[in-house]
Structure formats: C-alpha cells, structure tokens
Amino acid sequence: MPRNDTTSRRGFLRGAGLAAGTLVLGGCDSLSQAPWFRKLLFSAEQLTISAQRAVLGSNDLAREYTEADLSPKFRANGSTDPDDPKYRAMAANGFADWKLKVDGLVESPAEFSLADLRAMPSRTQITRHDCVEGWSCIGKWKGVPLGHVLEQVKLKPEARYLVFHCADALEKTLDGSGQYYESIGLDDAFHAQTILAYEMNDQVLPVAHGAPIRVRVERQLGYKMAKYMMRIEAVESFATIGGGNGGFWEDRGYEWYAGI
Amino acid sequence: MATTEQTPRKTYFYRHSIVVRVTHWINVLCMTVLLMSGLQIFNAHPALYIGEKSNFDAPVLSMGAGRQPDGTLVGVTQILGTNFDTTGVLGLSKADGDRMSVRGFPSWSTIPGYQDLATGRRWHFFFAWLFVINGLVYIGYSIATGHWRQLVPTVAQLRHTGSAIREHLMLRFPKGEEAKTYNVLQKLAYFGVVVVVIPVLILAGLTMSPGMDAAFPWLLDIFGGRQTARTIHFIAATLLVLFVLVHMLMVLLSGVFNNMRSMITGRYRIEDDLEKPHAAE
C-alpha cells in the first residue's frame, strides 16, 4: 500500500520541530542550573557595575518628585509583619526599647535609640521606589542621612561595605539562612539620598514598610532597601555573612548591584 | 544581449560579507534569548502602566486568572480595560506537564521555563551586553565599509514603494541585477529596525534602571516616566517580533535554501530576469 507521503512527512517535520523545541527549551532550563553556565551569566554583573560607575557620578541624585506624584497605594513587598517575638514586643511598645546597633569595623561602636536618630539632622525626599518585579511607587521619606550616623562611629580605613541586619525572616529555616539582610558599598552609604527613614508620607513609618527604620538607597532597586533594621555592621568583605553574596535575595541569585 | 535559451541562466554572487553573516547569527541567538528571558521578567509582574509610577487599578495591559461562576479558572488578558479570554496561553497555561498554572506568558515561551525572575534577569542582562557589543561591531563595520548606504532607500526607490508592495503581494521577487541589492521594502524594514526600533528598545530598557535614571534623568523625560518606558520596551519588542516573523516569511517565500546559503556561506544564486534586457553587459 502506498503511504500518504505528504502526511507522514508533515507528521515527521512536526514531530521533529516539537522535539527540537523541547530540547532547546529543556536545554535552557538545564543551562539555567549548571554552575559553569550560571558563572558565565553572572559575569555580566561586573560589566554592568563598571559601565554604570563610569557614567554615574557619586553625587548624582535620583529624581525627586512632588506631593502630587505620591502613589495613593504604596505596595509593600517581602515581609510586611515580622513574626519574631522580640520584634513584636518592641512594636507593641512603639519601639521605645529598640536600639540600632552600629558596629564592626568602626572606631567607636554605638547604639542609637529612635529618639537619638530623630534628634539628628534629617532629610526629606519624594522618590520613586522601583521593585525588581517591575512596578514603581512614589513615596515621601524622612530620615537621618546614613553618612551622618557613620560620622558618629567613624569607619575604620579597611571598611568597604555596610551590612544591614534585619528583624524579619523572609523564609522559615532552622539554620537562620532565611533571615533578611542586605549590604551596600561606601559610595551609596555616603550618598546624600541614602537615609535611615523613620517617616513615610508624613506618618510614622508603618510596620508593613519596615518600622522602625528602613534604609533608602534611591539609585538601586527595592530589595536593597532593607526594612526592620536592627544592626549595621561595617565589614571588609561579606563573604562569610549569610550565603556570602551580600544579601537575602543575592543568596537566591539576584544581583548584588541592583542599579539595573 | 538577451539570450535565446528559455531556461534562465544561474549565476552566483557573494552577497553577505563574513561580518554581516556572523553578526546576523549572533543576533538570532541574542534576540531569541532576550525575548524569552524578557517574558520571564514580565511574568514577575504581568502588567503595564503609563507614567512614572504603577497605577495598580488601571494597567494598560495585564494578564491574570479569574474564576468563572462555576469555579473553573480562566486566563484573562486585559487591554485598555477590555477583557479577553486567553486561557491556555496568557494568564493561565500548562506548566510542569499537565497542571494549569497562573502565569503571564506560558512556560514554553520563557527562559527559564519555570518561574525564576533572578535567573531570567541574569540571562537577559548577559545577552543584552552581547547584543549591544554585536550591534556595535555591525554598526562600526557598516560605517567603515559604507555598507550602511545599502540600507538607505533612494528617492527613486521610495517613489516605487507602492508597486514594490504589489509585487511582493503577488510573490514576485526581484531577479537579476535587482536581486543584488536590497529592495525598497527591505531597506525600509531594516533601516527602521536598526535606526528606530532597536535604539528605542535599548533606551527604554535603560530607563528602567534606577542607576541610569540618576546618571541621565533626561531618559525619564523622553519616555514620560519609568512605567511608560517599560510599556514602550514591551511594544518595541513586539514590533521586533513582528519584523522577525515577516522576515522569516519572506525568507521562506523567496527561496529558503538560497537565502540560507547566502547567510551561511555568503553565496547567493541569481536567476536572470528574462523579461528585462541585460543592462551593462
């Protein structure tokens, strides 16, 4: 019996096309998990850092907006209500017992109460918050410039990064690897718009947005702007902290440099 | 002189230089990965807005799932306030075998196939760098050799745009000497893509970077805000996909083997145009 050649050829081509497609897509998924390939993909981050540093002056400011631009609803991402008992106790007490510890590679480690920070010089800014997911909200923030706090404790010359330790665990783990933390370089630490914010939209910073203190790092994405801050540690390297990549999301594959 | 034989004479000529061929195929790889990893990134927040900020209540486009009265899930794509049922493709589609899952673009169109924004961004930025470097090599070459002139339509050609469209619709493609250079429709398409669509795509992409916005605040002004830039990035990518679809259709219709050979080896076969007398022979 003569076979219907056209149909079988078409069937074959169709099958071959599907198989090739599956192979390519499956290949991309395998590559996405292969350590050597991830290393290759991750190498682009250094190129991005170098390129952005070449064009971004250390004093360049993120755009500031007006009251009319404020988002009616500012989305809260990540932890919005930490369940750590110590944190909850402090929150119940209006953070009267909370203290921000600043230590590590500093000349004089110190602890600051919320009242101490509020008594320091403040900066108010209306800025755009860009989430890594793609959305943006505009909010008004008031806080003390981080650079001012750092001047009180005096960084040692070998300090290169600031690590922010937070009260919230974004992932439940037994070994503590789900604890939120972040880190920034000194260029961003001393940037005029980098503030420890205690007010948002003229109100006391709400718990959903990081009470009592959230850092604003306006030239980077939202995940760098750690909420529920408990401690700032000056370090030479963050290789031994957490998963060694400089932050909770960085340990899960996101870029340490989130200017893009 | 016109020959008396009725079979057209076949001649080969060297159509694409090595630089054009290599940059073309690197482009194929980059644009495929950029599109698919871009859809992965889009899926992290499958909605587009106008302005600086996201007005979550009024996206210009969004994808998601809704529930019908009987409880079954449907994929819904909303464009400018109108809902479309896109079950199976947009909003709700099969992932991990047979399980329906709520996601913007379907698993087969994203890199990675599973939901993973961090890895999608890594793919996107790596291949964005490769795309830009490859593009600079192409542009540098085009300027150095004068190749760019081949992409600019002449006034005489533009006058015949209408008849060129008619000829294309009748699937009659240039032969003989005419086939050695780009025709007016090719020039308009390539020139538009190289000079308009891709630069807009790249600039809109850069405008989504908070670092670049601090360095070049005018980026926000030319696009009218970060969220508009994200929407324009999406539209420009869609235009590029349309261009590629038409490009592939033309490659198929005007002799797929001849076209593929010329983009791989450089050699393109020309059939003499019997209807026209030979010029300058």
Image (cartoon, coloured by chain):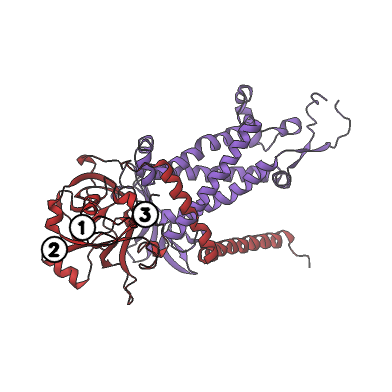
Chain colours: A red, B purple
Q: Tell me the subunit letter for badge 1.
A: A
* Sequence order check, earlier mark of 3 and 1: 3
Q: Residue furthest right?
A: B4
Q: Do the residues labelled 2 and 1 touch (CB within 8 Å)?
A: no
Q: Tell me if B64 is positioned left or right of A207 in this view.
A: right
From the viewer's side, name the closer residue of A86 and B80. Answer: A86
Q: Tell me the subunit letter for badge 3.
A: A
In the image, what residue occupies the spot 76% across and 32% down?
A: B176
Q: Name the residue under label 3.
A: A132
Q: What residue type is labelled 3?
A: Val
- Check if mark 3 and mark 1 are on a common chain: yes
Quadrant of the image occupied by residue A68 = top left
* Sequence order check, earlier mark of 3 and 2: 2
Q: Name the residue under label 2.
A: A95
Between circles 3 and 1, the one closer to the viewer is: 1
Q: Residue A213 carries which label?
A: 1
- Check if mark 2 and mark 1 are on a common chain: yes
Disc 1: CA contacts within 10 A as few (<14), some (14-19) or many (>=20): many
Q: Which amino acid does label 1 sit on?
A: Ile
Residue B153, compared with residue B227, is above or below; it is above
Task: From the top left corner, tell me how far across and down residue A123 is, in percent.
Answer: 19, 45
From the viewer's side, name the closer residue of A107 and A254. Answer: A107
The answer to whether residue B166 of the structure is visible from this angle is no
Disc 2: CA contacts within 10 A as few (<14), some (14-19) or many (>=20): some
3D distance between C-alphas at marks 3 and 1: 21 Å
Q: Tell me if B101 is positioned left or right of B134 in this view.
A: left
Q: Are marks 3 and 2 in contact (CB under 8 Å)?
A: no
Task: From the top left corner, tell me how far across and down residue A54 is, in percent.
Answer: 43, 43
Q: Residue B78 carries which label?
A: none
* Sequence order check, earlier mark of 2 and 1: 2
Q: Which residue lies furthest to the bottom in this view?
A: A174
